[in-house]
Structures are given as structure tokens and as C-alpha cells.
Image (spheres, coloured by chain):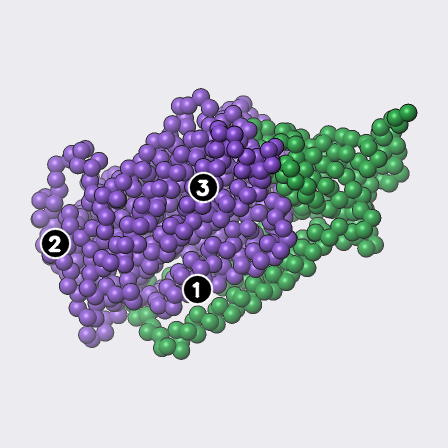
Chain colours: A green, B purple
Amino acid sequence: MKKSKSWSKGLLAGVPLLFLPVLAGAEQAGVPDLRAGWEELWHELMIDIWVIGIIFAAITVYFLIRYRRKHHDEEGQGPRLSRLASFGWVFVPAFLFLADDIFLAAKNFELWNKMREVPSGAYEIKVEGFMWGFDITHPGGATATNELRVPEGTAVKASLTSRDVVHSFFLPDYRVKWDMVPGMNTYLWFNSGAPGEHVMTCAEYCGAMHSGMYGKVIVMPRAEFEKWIKENAPEQKS
Amino acid sequence: MSTQVLLEPAETAGLATVKQRFSLKEWIFTTDHKRVAVLYMIGAFAAFFVAGIMAMLMRTELASLGPTITANPSTYNTWLYFHGAAMILGYQIPALTGFFANYYVPLMIGAKDVAFPRVNALSVWLFWMGIILALLTFVIPDPPDIMWTGYPPYSILTGGNTAFYTFTVLLMGFSSIAGGVNFLTTIIYMRAPGVTWGKMNMFIWCTLAAFIIQIIFVPVLGAAVTMLSFDKYLGTSFFNPAAGGSPLIYENLFWFYSHPAVYVIFLPAIGLIYEIMATFARNRIFNYKKIVYYGVLGVVGLGGVVWAHHLYVAGIPNWMILIHVFMTLIISVPVGLLMIGLLGTLYKGSIHYATPMLYAAGFVFLFLIGGLTGIPNAMSSIYIHLTDTYWMPGHFHYVMAISMTTAIIGGTYYVFPKMTGRMYSEKLGWIGFFLFFIGANITFMFTMIMGVKGMPRRYYDYQQFPEIEWMQQVATIGSYIIFLGALVVLISWLHGAFYGRKVGRNPWGSRSLEWTHAPSPPPPGNYGDGVKLPDDWNPYGYGKEPH
């Protein structure tokens, strides 16, 4: 993300300017970048929210100043609405809000479908939450705890479950999380992007060490990753 | 300060006869709705104060990476459990549906008391038992540590005392149901002649709506937490996956009540804000009937079908998510109408800035931020990142905690002269408001920003996010400012109650019944031999048109 662009949008959108650009856009052919999708929708949403907020706030401030009591026996002269006007003041705003709601719902499902449809050929790992850590099993049988190694620029599907209580598998940099429920299998997927390290942490309260239940996602160059997988594959049973 | 009195009776002299000798027995066994209200008020503010201290402890703990004031995360979790459970079940719901409902409903509708005064006493007793049980959290060796949500299987497996949670919820729940039956009956059957459905105060409509929600949904929560304790102590397996149960059933049942509970708090709160704004702007409610039908009742209609937005990533089926995204977004329609009604009430008003009006104005801004930051949470694809991060506490502290607290504190200042017959100090009122307002914005704005950056909630420590330490510190400083503000508010009330200037029945110049027809404070029985109202009476009959 370019900084200047982020600033100009940030002025409009307020909060997002505090984002740290984490992943260099590394969209592989055919694999959507969910993080970029999230950021884009978030920016649009922020504009939507700030516009509504500023309209309401500006009117409030204006009324609060304009209609101060001038002398002590003054009374308000609020309008008596005609039947038509009273319905107008319900249905016109209601239609405006509804239009915005439908627009936002449509935008939402567009991204949501991408988030819930795992691209074919995704690298599939199993993650089991426990009090307090994440056990990871790779397709070849390699295992790790609190350290999720994935190849760069790949769609990674994490199949989630829990050994004891409800946890939540949260990858803040990738803008995704999903609950890990004992007795159930859930999933999420993300685009691993460029090599680097990212936080993986628990987001559902799970007891004393809830805040200590975290680890790393390590995105590796392909060759290095292949090597690591080979070295860590379990020995063949004879 | 202008003390506009519409009907100018010289009844301040008669106050001494109203004031009785203090008798603890009379207070405990009282069935007078105004005394029951005071008992609710004391209990609710006690819960607010203790839960507020828990918040201060947590914010202090979070002010530095690693242990700050406790090295034991379980201690922190108990603070957090108490803070959430006490603030919602012990403070907000009882303050609004106990204290204000009790004080205002009979007075505003011209009744001598509630329909079932003894059931009312039962309600407040159950509430106090709940408060005492909750406070015992601090003396038992195995305090509950399951958060106010109590999700299984953790709540079943933990060594913490889940039964305390269950029984606190049940006591508060029974108290609410008893209150609901009482107030629905009172509002429907005990209005004075002339107080028609179309001339009821906004607060009465909002209270009616809130109790409809309580009566429908509280039993569901009661059932859920009871099953939880059955699972833990009697070996059943409703929610325990180890024996074939499903935690998701609990999560659904819990939010099936606990989302509507937000509206149980929101509706009476915005009702109070309407009362304050109408009185201090001396203006009629903008589009009153439509706001009631489409705003207040619209919230009741939609409130029960949006709970799954708490569960988008919990593992519920996708079709449920699709429905609830849409329903949740649509909540913006009735809530937006309620906001338009508020702003319309200011239009061409005559606004006087006494302390209650400051709080009402503050409410508009805080609720605006809180409401608008709810929109991202309705959208599953945005929510997937934000849920269970600091964004959520940031959002719901804006929309519930601090917005509704401005309504509760502002409402208390508003009712203060009626309750005590005395006036608080405006200077202290203003100082308290600005400390509260500024502190709250600092704390929760930074809370939301930390959430967007990925900081999960309910964390004792944040080693994986060292870069946000400075924001935690700013939020902590903000919380100290809030606490200071709350102390000033408390001092202003105590000072006003003992040393305040005596006032007549209607220091605000309101047209509402409790101000025009009842002395301050009102005697037992309120209106003596009943209220007679002229045909053109209206609680919002401002505007000086020739009658």
C-alpha cells in the first residue's frame, strides 16, 4: 500500500491511517488476496460511516448552538407535521437507510463468498487448539506447535478443531479468524503472500493463559519450505 | 439558573411533613415505588462503582507489557468477569428498568403506585440478593472466571465457581420478570384518565417496549445458564462435546437473550434522553407517533432476530449468517428513526444547558459513534477480522456502556430535584460531565484503534503486540479521567442531597405530569385523590399557542 494514498484516504476515513502496511501485495494468479479485499471494503465502509456521522453530527451541533434559549420564558416552536409529512419523515429516511443497507450487504457477500470458498489446490493443514497452544499437522505428517510454516504466495486452508474448550484461530495480518470448537470441524483459508512472519493468536477466551496462547505464521520461499517439509517429515514406518 | 415554575405552589414549606424519620425497617419492607426506586438506585450505583474499580484495576494492569499489578492472570480474569457481569446485570439493566422505571412510570402516568406493590418489593429484594451474591465473588476461594458470556465447555471445565454465575443471572432474571409483569400491567391499566396511548411519555413507551423484550427473552437465558450448571454439577451434557453436547447451542441461546438485552438497556435510556431533550428544549417530540410505532416498536420487532451476528465465526451454518447480516443491517432503520426524532426535538427548540441537557447532548455524539461502528460488525466479511478484538469492547462501550451511562447519569440529574426536593450544583455537574465525556472518548477511541490493529480482547497481557503499548497507556489515562468524573458526579449528588438549595415542584418548567402535578419529593400515593387533566393536556404541550 502506498503511503501517500493511505494518508489521503485516511483523512477521509480517519481510523485506517493507523494501519501498518504488512503484506506486500502478492496476489498469485487466481488466488484472491483477502487482506486487500478486506482493506478495500473497510475503506469504503469508513467513508460511508463518516459521511453519515458527519451529517448527523453537523446537524446536531448546529441545532445545539442555533436554538439556545434566548430569554427565560421562551418556548420551543417545533413543527406540527401534517399526515403526509409525518409519513415522509419515516419512509424517506427508512428508504435511504435501507438502500445503504442493501448496498453494504451486497458488498459484504461478494467478499464473504471469497472468504468461504477455498481456492482449489490450496495447501491444507490441520490446526488443533488446546489450553494453551496450537498443534499444527502438515499434509506430509510434519507437525509443529505454535509455529505454522507455509510456502509463499499460496492459498492455505486451515482445518480447525479443538481438544478442550472453544478457541479462535486468529491471524490479524491476514484479517481472518475462525472459532475452534471441540467436537466440530471448522475452517478458514488465507493467501500466504510474501515471505515473512505474522502473529497467530487465540481470540476466544479460554482461561488463565488465553493471552499467552499465540505463535507465528512463517511464510517461507518455496524451495526453503520444501526442504523444511522433507526434513521434518515423520520417519517411514517399516 | 432560571427556575421556571409553571404552576407555582408554595409547597416547599410543606416538605417537612413529607420528610419522615429514617427507619431502616420501613425502607426494607417498603412497597412505595419511589422508595423501591431508591433501593434500585443504590444497588445499581454500588454495582457500577465496584465494577468501575475492576475496570481501573484492569486498565492499570494493561498499562505495561508483562505483569503490572498482578502476576496472576486468573485474578485479572476474575476482575473482567465481575466488570462485565456487574455492569450489565447489576448496573445498567437495574438502573434503567428498576430505578428509573420505578420512579417515573407511576408518576408519569398519574398513578398512585405500581399495579402490584408487593411484587415490586419482591423484585428489588431479588435484585439485592443478586448484588450480594455477585459481591461474594471477592470472598469465595474459587471465584467465577468465565466472563459474563459463560461459554461452555470452558465454564464446565473450569475450577471457577460457575454456580455463582448461574444463580446471579437467575436472581436478576426473576427480578426482571416480576418487574416486567408489574410494569406492563401498570402501564396498560393504571394510566390516569386523559393519559391516552397517544399522550404517553416517550419514556413510558420505551419502558413498555423494554419489558416486552425482557419477558420474552429472559426465560431463554435462565434456561441456558441453568443447563450450564446442570452440565457442570449434575453431569448432564447439553453443551459438553465430550459427551455429545454442543457448545454452539449455548452460544445461540445466550445471544438469543443477550442481544435483545442491548435493547432492554437502549430503549429506556433513549426514552430518558427524549424526556430530557423535550424538557430542556421546551419542545414537542418530533413526529411522536411515528417514532413510537416505527422506531420504538420497530426495535422490538427486529431485536429478536439478529442475535447470530455475535456468532458469524462460531461455526454456525452459512444460511444463518446470510439472514442475520441482512437483519442486523436493517436495525439501522428503527434506530436511525429514533435519532431523527431526537434531532427533530431540538429543531426550533429553546435549549437551556443545565447538566441533564449536557448529558443528553453528549449522548447523541457517543451513540452516533457507537451506532455507526456497529455497521462493520453487521458485515460478516469485515467482522471476521474485528470480532473478539478490542474493536468490540470499543464499539459496545460507546454504544452501550458510555452512551447509556450518559442517559443514566443525566437522567439522575434530571430527576434529582424531584427526588430530593433540592438542587445539585451546576458547577460540579458541568465538571463531572466534561471529565466523563473526554475520558470516555480517549479510552474507547484508542480501544477501537487497537482492535483494528488486531489486539484480541480479554487479554491479561499482550506480548505478541508490543507496538500497541503506548495506546494501552493512553487508554488507561483516559479511564482515570472517567473515574475522576464519576467521583465528581457522586460528590455533586451527595452535596446536592444534603446542602442543595430547596426547589419547588417544577424547577425545569416541564409540562410532564410528574413535574406539574406532584410535589418534590412526591408523598406516598403521589397524587392524593387522583389526577384530573384537561382535554388539551400533553406531556409535551409546549409552544405557547393560544389554548
Identify the residue shown where x is 60% and y is 54%. Answer: B321
Q: Which residue is mark 1?
A: B337
Residue topped by disc 2: B528
Expressed as whole percent of the image width and height from the top left, the position of residue B231 reads 51, 33
Q: Quadrant of residue B349?
A: bottom left
Which element carries disc 1, helix, strand or loop? helix
Disc 3 residue crowd, few under 14, some 14–19, many 20+, Cα 10 Å: some
Query: Is label 2 on the same chain as label 3?
Result: yes
Label 3 in the same subunit as label 1: yes
Kind of residue at badge 3: Ala
Q: As drawn, which residue projects farthest toward the top?
A: B141
CA separation, marks 3 and 1?
A: 34 Å
Q: Is residue B422 above or below residue B27?
A: below
Query: Is the N terminus of chain B in the top left, top right, bottom left or bottom right quadrant?
Result: bottom left
How many numbered discs? 3
Residue at 66% in and 35% down:
A162
The residue tagged 3 is: B223
Give the residue displayed 25% in from the left and 65% down from the top: B196
Give percent across and percent down for residue A217.
74, 37
* Horizontal side of residue B269 vs B257, given as left or right: left
